[in-house]
Image: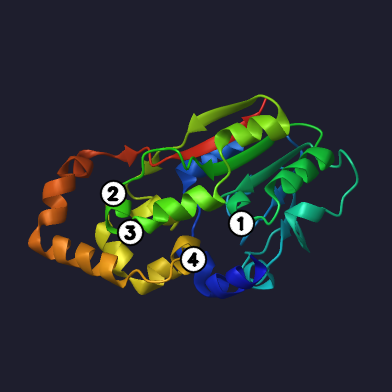
Amino acid sequence: MERLYDTIGLNYANLRRPDPRIARRIEAALHGAETVLNVGAGAGSYEPTGCRITAVEPSAEMIGQRRPSDAVVIQGSAEDLPFEDNAFDASMAVLTIHHWSDKKRGVAEMRRVTRGKIVFLTYDSEFPAFWLTDYLPELVTLDEGQMPRLQDFDRWLGPVAVSPVPIPHDCTDGFLACYWRRPAAYLDEKVRAAMSSFWALDDVADGLAKLESDLKSGEWERRYSRLLALDALDCGYRLVETR
């Protein structure tokens, strides 16, 4: 993951700006924590205010794109957190667990160093995929292979609360489903460069050519016009919280 994000990270902070509506969901889940560990922190998106943050991130490129803050930043991995037991009130991991080499161990490490709540923003690979997979069906296979199942969190942590995180139509964070109502964005190489899924696929040219053709002909709008009236869409993203 470190090498991948050293490449993706070249313009990551500009294209992956935290969406305030999603940020409020995460901050509410962490409410009351004075010390928070952010694992797989990337460029620091979604770190709550009003508490002391410690961020762990394997990629130096990503760390270098963090905005100035009082956070303590450590280059390291989820699977080997350099902290004592119960060192933090809460911990968080946002759209990162699918990149960990040993998910079970990484979650166990978070549990070891956290006194209270653990919060994940992740993706439910068993959720019906959104329209982009009609053009790039290999995305389904990719998610099935790298995403933990929601029931894995129960096995690793005990009972957890799971809630949907609908994606706003004008979401400012450039993750994969961010542009569900702005389909032309997926034709932009710079936009795709900030999405790890596209780096994992060998050849997307045919699927993108079909999307471009459907946008020009009006076929995309004919097939998916119902989406254009929606302000937000459940694309399978889930907030997972320990009880």
Picture residue at 56% right of the left edge, 42% below the top: 121
* In-image side of 87 versus 236 (left or right): right
Q: Which residue is mark 2?
A: 131
Whether label 2 touches label 1, CB < 8 Å? no
Within 10 Å of disc 3 (Cα), the crowding (few <14, some 14-19, many 20+) is some
Q: Which residue is mark 1?
A: 99
Q: Position of residue 85 (x, y in %)?
A: 89, 41
Picture residue at 54% right of the left edge, 44% below the top: 122
Within 10 Å of disc 4 (Cα), the crowding (few <14, some 14-19, many 20+) is few
Q: Residue 231's image quarter?
A: top left
Q: Amino acid at mark 2?
A: Trp
* In-image side of 143 versus 177 (left or right): right
Q: Quadrant of the N terminus?
A: bottom right
Gap in Å between the C-alphas at discs 1 and 4?
Answer: 11 Å
Q: Which residue is mark 3?
A: 136
Question: Can residue 159 be seen in this snapshot?
Answer: yes
Sequence order check: which comes first, mark 2 or mark 1?
1
Q: Which residue is mark 4?
A: 200
Query: Please, what secondary structure does the residue beneath circle 3 have?
Result: loop
Instruction: Determine the residue located farthest toward the right in the rendered image.
Output: 84
Whether label 1 touches label 4, CB < 8 Å? no
Within 10 Å of disc 2 (Cα), the crowding (few <14, some 14-19, many 20+) is some
Sequence order check: which comes first, mark 3 or mark 4?
3
Sequence order check: which comes first, mark 1 or mark 3?
1
Is residue 11 or residue 133 the one in the foreground? 133
